[in-house]
Amino acid sequence: MIILHDFKINIEDYEAMGKENHFPLLDNCPKCRSLAQGNVHRNGYY
């Protein structure tokens, strides 16, 4: 499942911050709403 998130910053700032960007924390599945054990796993960033 792909979840798009608007960081509300420009691409240059996003690139400069890298993994220090403020990524959303997901504690449940956006599709079925079942609760996750901890945080829903996220793969990578651009």
Image (cartoon, rainbow, N blue to C red):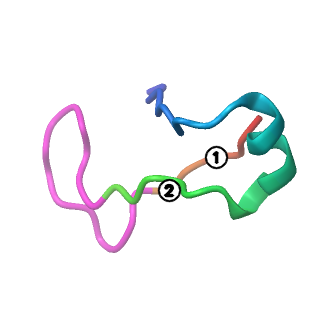
Q: Tell me where residue 15 sits by quadrant.
A: top right
Asked whether, in this view, residue 46 is left or right of residue 37, the answer is right
Where are the magenta residues, as a range?
27-40
Q: Amino acid at mark 2?
A: His
* SS assignment for the magenta stretch, majority: loop
Residue nearest the observer in this picture, 12 or 18? 12
Q: Which residue is mark 1?
A: 43
Q: Tell me where residue 28 sits by quadrant.
A: bottom left
Q: Which residue is mark 2?
A: 41
- Does residue 33 show up magenta in the picture? yes
Please state the horizontal and vertical placement of residue 29, each as a whole percent of the image. 25, 45
Residue nearest the observer in this picture, 11 or 4? 11
Number of numbered discs = 2
Please state the horizontal and vertical placement of residue 20, each as a whole percent of the image. 71, 64
Please state the horizontal and vertical placement of residue 37, each as a whole percent of the image. 29, 71
Task: From this view, report whether residue 27 is shown above or below residue 10.
Answer: below
Task: From this view, report whether residue 16 is shown above or below residue 4.
Answer: below
Q: Amino acid at mark 1?
A: Asn
